[in-house]
Image (cartoon, rainbow, N blue to C red):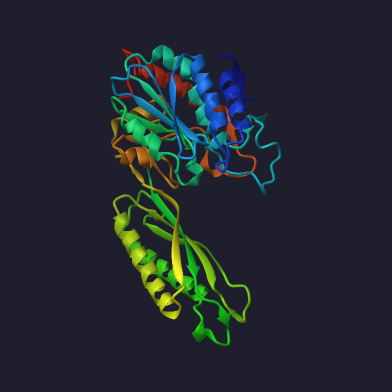
């Protein structure tokens, strides 16, 4: 592979940059089909004699990809990435967002940090995996709709967990500045559509005010959130479960009793809390407000529309593979906790030990002029080669 210098003496594989440029060129925003980018990946793997299988969604317009390199009868390593990105509309980019642009040691483009940079590094390392992964396999797990609350991952995770021998470790390559992440909060979010009964504001007793009902829901959610702060975990910031009302819209004229209001909320849970109990409390709140609203007008209702729901990650800090992965990165730093959610929680919930580590930084994700450093890609390239060697018959530095 021809190396490329980033201006500071750090060398990045030109193969990685070529692949990343190709990946960024796919407008794989979650609202669109990801089949073009998945087809590109499948074709690339095929050229290296790696078979892959697609796991389509119900509509057939999207698919995850699962491939195995090496002996499938032994426990190995899973490398997980998502292929979708967030939209660019309304953002002021300095260069075309779906064209990889290099300047001052940085590669700009939508998805460069989140997380096509990691995906490119993995694909560039496929020849090394084919050559070296003889003692243990590597499984490539690429999903869709991660940006829609990890909506596309469950089928892929289930297929990975059902492999002949499940992976001994899953590495999710979300941007962590190549620090090893071991834990993050879970999250569920819903939209509450409150339907009341409209009427003149001079006769409110003949109507059912949807905005007032939504306000009761917002205050009730805040009260639940306040109670949840009593259970803490100092590994996180903030160290407790949070309940957040992100939007509340309703009404249009002061002299009209509003018949519609929409509220959106999210709950981010620390590991160990009873998520089912929290959901039950919120459901009871919704039932109570709905009943009062219906008492005013039988046509009134509250509809619950799920937005996202994924579990947290709580890999033990003393997992042997975490320390060994840090060592492969040339670091003695212990694993960290993350402020954002990933598909890692799904793998962890499926019984697969899971860590999060990838090039780029979450602070750059979803923003205009998203970028990943060439030095970060070079370090990730080096890590992939070390992982490939660690999957050999007699690794000098075993991962497991």
> Considering the image in quadrants, where does the N terminus appear?
top right
Quick check: can you spot residue 306?
A: yes
Residue 249 horizontal/vertical position (percent): 56, 67
The residue lying at 58 percent from left, 72 percent from top is: 251
Quick check: can you spot residue 378?
A: no
Using the image as rendered, state which of residue 250 and residue 126 is in the foreground.
Answer: 250
The residue lying at 63 percent from left, 31 percent from top is: 25
Quadrant of the rendered structure where residue 397 is?
top left
- Count of numbered circles in the view: 0
Using the image as rendered, state which of residue 254 and residue 110 is in the foreground.
Answer: 254
Residue 89 horizontal/vertical position (percent): 66, 46
Q: Is residue 364 left or right of residue 157?
A: right
Q: Is residue 231 left or right of residue 331?
A: left
Q: Is residue 5 above or below residue 150?
A: above
Q: Is residue 288 above or below residue 31?
A: below
Residue 37 horizontal/vertical position (percent): 56, 30
The residue lying at 57 percent from left, 30 percent from top is: 36
Using the image as rendered, state which of residue 158 and residue 8 is in the foreground.
Answer: 158
> Considering the image in quadrants, where does the C terminus appear?
top left
Q: Is residue 147 above or below residue 293?
A: above
Instruction: Specify the farthest residue to the bottom.
Output: 202
Instruction: Specify the farthest residue to the front.
Output: 299
Quadrant of the rendered structure where residue 392 is?
top left
Residue 299 horizontal/vertical position (percent): 46, 73
Quadrant of the rendered structure where residue 170 is?
top left
Using the image as rendered, state which of residue 1 and residue 139 is in the foreground.
Answer: 139
The residue lying at 51 percent from left, 15 percent from top is: 47
């Amino acid at each position: 592979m021809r190396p490329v210098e980033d201006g500071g003496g750090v060398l990045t594989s030109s193969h990685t940059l070529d692949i990343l440029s190709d990946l960024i060129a796919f407008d794989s925003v979650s609202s669109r089909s990801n089949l073009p980018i998945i087809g590109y990946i499948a074709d690339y793997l095929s050229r290296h004699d790696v078979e892959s299988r697609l796991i389509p969604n119900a509509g057939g317009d999207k698919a995850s990809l699962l491939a195995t390199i090496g002996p499938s009868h032994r426990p190995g390593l899973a490398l997980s990435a998502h292929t979708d990105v967030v939209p660019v509309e309304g953002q002021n980019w300095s260069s075309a967002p779906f064209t990889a642009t290099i300047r001052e040691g940085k590669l700009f483009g939508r998805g460069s940090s989140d997380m096509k940079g990691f995906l490119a590094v993995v694909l560039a390392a496929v020849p090394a995996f084919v050559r070296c992964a003889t003692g243990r396999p590597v499984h490539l797990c690429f999903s869709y709709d991660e940006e829609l609350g990890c909506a596309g991952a469950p089928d892929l995770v289930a297929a990975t967990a059902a492999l002949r021998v499940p992976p001994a470790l899953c590495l999710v390559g979300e941007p962590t500045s190549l620090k090893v992440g071991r834990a993050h909060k879970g999250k569920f979010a819903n939209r509450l559509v409150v339907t009341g009964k409209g009427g003149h504001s001079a006769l409110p007793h003949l109507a059912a005010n949807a905005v007032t009902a939504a306000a009761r829901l917002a205050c009730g959610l805040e009260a639940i959130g306040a109670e949840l702060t009593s259970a803490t975990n100092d590994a996180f910031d903030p160290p407790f479960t949070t309940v957040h009302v992100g939007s509340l819209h309703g009404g249009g004229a002061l002299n009209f009793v509003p018949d519609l209001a929409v509220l959106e909320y999210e709950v981010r849970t620390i590991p160990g809390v009873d998520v089912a109990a929290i959901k039950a409390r919120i459901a009871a709140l919704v039932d109570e407000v709905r009943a009062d609203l219906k008492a005013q007008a039988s046509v009134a209702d509250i509809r619950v529309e799920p937005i996202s729901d994924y579990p947290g990650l709580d890999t033990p800090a003393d997992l042997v593979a975490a320390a060994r992965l840090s060592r492969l990165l040339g670091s003695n730093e212990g694993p960290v906790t993350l402020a954002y959610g990933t598909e890692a929680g799904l793998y962890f919930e499926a019984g697969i030990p899971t860590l999060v580590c990838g090039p780029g930084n979450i602070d750059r994700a979803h923003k205009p002029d998203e970028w990943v450093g060439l030095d970060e890609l070079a370090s990730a390239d080096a890590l992939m080669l070390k992982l490939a060697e660690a999957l050999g018959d007699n690794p000098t530095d075993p991962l497991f």
